[in-house]
Image: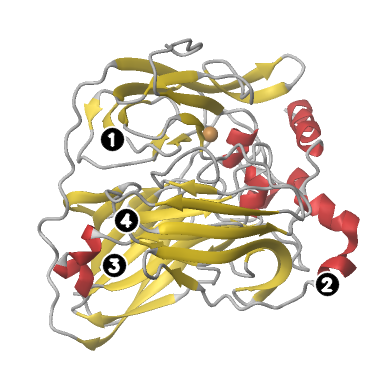
């Protein structure tokens, strides 16, 4: 196992990790950038149909909860500024890359063009360069929780793990439902960090890359265990994003069920009651919580979850410090003065059943040895090649994708731009219909999804959202073509 790990680090070494670059350019240079930003969130809302802002990726000393840390950030904030827009709005982001390595931005979950200066993850913005992203949110875009983060293959995990992530909220129909509107709205961005005593990021060599790096410092909105105070008898609307590189969160609020009202791609048809909520990297959940217990303070817990099979070795030195079999407190919810009781909504937004698919494809997810490369993470036995088209689909068709995990680790599967519905897991129909763009495929499990390709021809990707797995090959190029040309290779 040691040998395999060393090969891994050789692959990673070629890309000069951020921690190494910081060490090379010296603390002095970074000290000049010292701003001691507060973690108070900056919110940028669209006005008169336009959302324009300057966004800079940087390395600074930053306040993270009660600690000082050298982290990657957008505009000095962890998480990055929260962007808010409406369907039909034009978005213009004047981006500056002040990182010591190239980067770019992916708009996770937004249904926008995948070409030009929109959600084009094949762009490479070199260190020191500027780039203007511009796109329109379609008029029929659902309201929901979306987010932005870097997506340059090979560097995604470490740039996200360094802190680069922010919310992109689309406001719309769901927000206008009276009970939803009456709820106290709070956001919860979950991230984890691996820092040494001085607040420096640990080098990726010191982390468990193969299973997916996790840090033992978990933050909620860049804070440690924040409290959300809500009126007694009121409703809390908690809008949660798992912005961690690899960590799963199995959430439970003491004495309170969650009422799920929206998933990755927008609203459900009606609230779904659940005692706990598993959120894998990249997933979002919009939940209502009724403040109808004894007034007091309740803990939002992260319950233990084993995402790596017993057969896999070494979950990494970071994780040895964590009592993983113990629940961890992420935040608290407390009640203050009483208001008139707010009921739960009965109906939300209809989620239509999709018509039959024109094509079925199979994607087998596993890891294995690649000659000359060592161990890699694979779709259908292949690791990612930037120039190879793995899957070619026709515009205006629907496809069923069968996701088969034959490996020993869980893999959250993500497709860019196009949301899908989960039809079944191991042949069992899904409990409720929902729009998703990340779905967990557990070790040994087969998940069937149905996806419409309605607009936006061009090239994009699907991948595992444990971003170390993505960087180590578990990604494929997806081409959406407007004509009838078909030359698909691989999974048919
Ligand atoms: Cu994975």
Circles 1 and 3, Cβ within 8 Å, touching? The answer is no
Instruction: Name the outermost residue toward the left.
Output: 346
For residue 14, side relative to residue 297 (left or right): right
Q: Is residue 7 left or right of residue 49?
A: right
Label 3 SS: strand
Query: Residue 326: x percent and y percent?
Result: 48, 57
Which residue is denoted by mark 4 in the rendering?
Answer: 87
Nearer to us in this view, 32 or 481: 481
Residue under numbered circle 2:
31
Give the distance between the C-alpha atoms of the residues marked 2 and 1, in whole angstroms: 48 Å
Would you call the spot at circle 3 few (<14 residues within 10 Å), some (14-19), or many (20 or more)? many
Q: Residue at x 53, y 77 (%)?
A: 40
Q: Residue at x 73, y 14 (%)?
A: 371
Q: Disc 4 or 3, which lies upstream in sequence? A: 4
The label on residue 237 is 3
* Few, some or many residues within 10 Å of mark 4 (<14, 14–19, 20+): some
Report helix, strand or loop for mark 4: loop
Q: Are marks 4 and 2 in contact (CB under 8 Å)?
A: no
| In this rendering, position of residue 320 left or right of residue 311 | right
Marked residue nearer the N-terminal end (3 or 2): 2
SS of the residue at dot 2?
A: helix
Real-space Cα distance between discs 3 and 2? 39 Å
In this orientation, which residue lies closer to the viewer: 301 or 457?
Answer: 457
Q: Quadrant of residue 428?
A: top left
- Horizontally, residue 116 falls left or right of residue 239, namely right
Marks 1 and 4 sit apart, C-alpha to C-alpha, by 22 Å
Query: Residue 277: which numbered mark, if any?
Result: none
Q: CA distance from mark 4 to mark 2?
A: 41 Å
């Amino acid at each position: 196992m040691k040998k395999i790990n060393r090969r891994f680090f050789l692959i990673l070494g070629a890309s000069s990790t951020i921690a190494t670059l910081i060490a090379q350019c010296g603390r002095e240079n970074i000290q000049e950038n010292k701003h001691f930003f507060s973690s108070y969130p900056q919110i940028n809302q669209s006005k008169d149909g336009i959302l324009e802002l300057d966004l800079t990726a940087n390395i600074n000393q930053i306040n993270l909860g009660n600690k000082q840390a050298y982290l990657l950030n957008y505009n000095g904030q962890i998480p990055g500024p929260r962007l808010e827009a409406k369907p039909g709005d034009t978005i213009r982001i004047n981006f500056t890359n002040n990182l010591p390595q190239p980067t770019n931005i992916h708009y996770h979950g937004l249904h926008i063009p995948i070409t030009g200066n929109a959600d084009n993850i094949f762009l490479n913005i070199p260190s020191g360069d500027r780039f203007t992203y511009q796109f329109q949110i379609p008029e029929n875009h659902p309201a929901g929780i979306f987010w932005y983060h870097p997506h340059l293959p090979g560097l995604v995990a470490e740039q996200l793990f360094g802190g680069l992530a922010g919310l992109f909220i689309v406001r719309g129909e769901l927000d206008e439902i009276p009970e939803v509107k009456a709820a106290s709205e709070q956001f919860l961005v979950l991230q984890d960090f691996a820092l040494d005593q001085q607040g420096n990021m640990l080098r990726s060599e010191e982390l468990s890359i193969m299973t997916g790096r996790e840090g033992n410092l978990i933050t909620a909105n860049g804070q440690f265990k924040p409290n959300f105070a809500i009126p007694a008898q009121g409703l809390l609307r908690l809008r949660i994003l798992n912005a961690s590189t690899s960590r799963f969160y199995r959430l439970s609020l003491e004495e309170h069920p969650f009422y799920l009202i929206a998933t990755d791609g927008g609203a459900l048809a009606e609230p779904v009651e659940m005692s706990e909520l598993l959120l894998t990297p990249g997933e979002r959940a919009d939940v209502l919580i009724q403040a109808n217990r004894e007034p007091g303070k309740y803990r939002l817990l992260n319950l233990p979850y084993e995402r790596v099979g017993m057969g896999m070795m070494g979950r990494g030195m970071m994780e040895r410090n964590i009592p993983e079999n113990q629940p961890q407190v992420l935040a608290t919810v407390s009640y203050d003065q009483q208001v008139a009781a707010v009921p739960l909504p009965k109906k939300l937004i209809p989620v239509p059943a999709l018509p039959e698919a024109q094509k079925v494809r199979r994607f087998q997810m596993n890891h294995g040895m690649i000659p000359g490369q060592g161990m890699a993470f694979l779709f259908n036995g292949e690791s990612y090649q930037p120039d190879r088209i793995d899957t070619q689909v026709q515009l205006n068709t629907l496809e069923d994708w069968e996701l088969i995990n034959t490996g020993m680790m869980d893999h959250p599967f993500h497709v860019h731009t196009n949301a899908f519905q989960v039809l079944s897991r191991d042949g069992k129909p899904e409990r409720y219909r929902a729009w998703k763009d990340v779905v967990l495929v557990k070790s040994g499990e087969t998940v069937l999804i149905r996806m419409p390709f309605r607009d936006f021809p061009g090239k994009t990707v699907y991948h595992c959202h444990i971003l170390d797995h993505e960087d180590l090959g578990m990604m494929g190029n997806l081409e959406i073509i407007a004509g009838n040309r078909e030359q698909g290779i691989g999974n048919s």
